[in-house]
Amino acid sequence: MTAVFSHGRLRLYLLKLLDDGPKHGYELIRLLADRFHGTYAPSAGTIYPRLARMETEGLVTHTAAGGRKTYSITEGGRAELRQRAGELADLEQDINKSVSDLAAEIQAEVRGSARDLKRELREATRQTKRSPWVFEVQIGTRAQSDPQEDFDRRLAAFTDEVRAIVRRGRFSDDQLRTASRLLDGVLDGLRRLQR
């Protein structure tokens, strides 16, 4: 679990989310994932035991319908929210900082990947401008390498790397637009090469 939620702070944030209205456990997980732009999402094994403890302590209650429990905050839970209002404000600031730091890391990774992409494309361009056959030394012998095969291999590796980067973290809408513009720029560059 992220350090933002140490020392009972996740419990406090769950109370805050339930103060907005009744929710089931997976809805709470989704709301937390959305709050952290997909970079953190607690597991069901983290949320449900906390909700059960909070219910035992009289902070929340649940109703069951269709095999799903919907949790609601109690007056005791609201009293705790009021008592810990200052701590909740600090927690919101910490969450904002954490999300901002994670966004900066993702942006740096995207910029690095864009630089890598440009370097790969420049190298691919140099390779295609050379003679139709590129000779490489392999264990003392000369082997022919087809530039088209080399390009296809590099393109597949690039595609795999982009997918891996996207899977590692959820991007904000602005970051996805920036990444899309970078990819559009690469495509435009390849089209110019064709002319």
Image (cartoon, grey):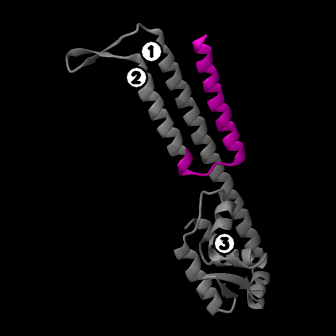
The residue at which mark 1 appears reads as: 127
Residue name at image x 57 percent, y 41 percent: 109
- Percent x, y for residue 111? 60, 36
Work out how far the residue at label 3 is from the one at label 2, CA to CA, in angstroms. Answer: 48 Å
**188 is higher (above) or lower (below) than 71:** above
Q: Is residue 137 magenta?
A: no
Residue name at image x 40 percent, y 9 percent: 132
Q: Secondary structure at mark 3?
A: helix
Q: In the rendered structure, find residue 28 and report the number of the disc placed on it.
A: 3
**42 is higher (above) or lower (below) than 51:** above
* Residue lying furthest front: 66
The residue at which mark 2 appears reads as: 150
Kind of residue at disc 3: Leu
* Residue lying furthest left: 140
Q: Earlier in the sequence, mark 1 or mark 3?
A: 3
Callout 1–callout 2 Cβ contact below 8 Å: yes
- Percent x, y for residue 84? 75, 80
Q: Secondary structure at mark 1?
A: helix
- Percent x, y for residue 11? 65, 78
Magenta stretch? Answer: 166-195
Kind of residue at disc 2: Asp
The crowding category of the residue bearing disc 2, from other C-alpha atoms within 10 Å (few below 14, some 14 to 19, many at least 20), is some
Q: Main secondary structure of the magenta part?
A: helix
Work out how far the residue at label 1 is from the one at label 3, CA to CA, in angstroms. Answer: 52 Å
- Percent x, y for residue 61? 69, 89
Examine the image and state in which quarter residue 73 appears: bottom right
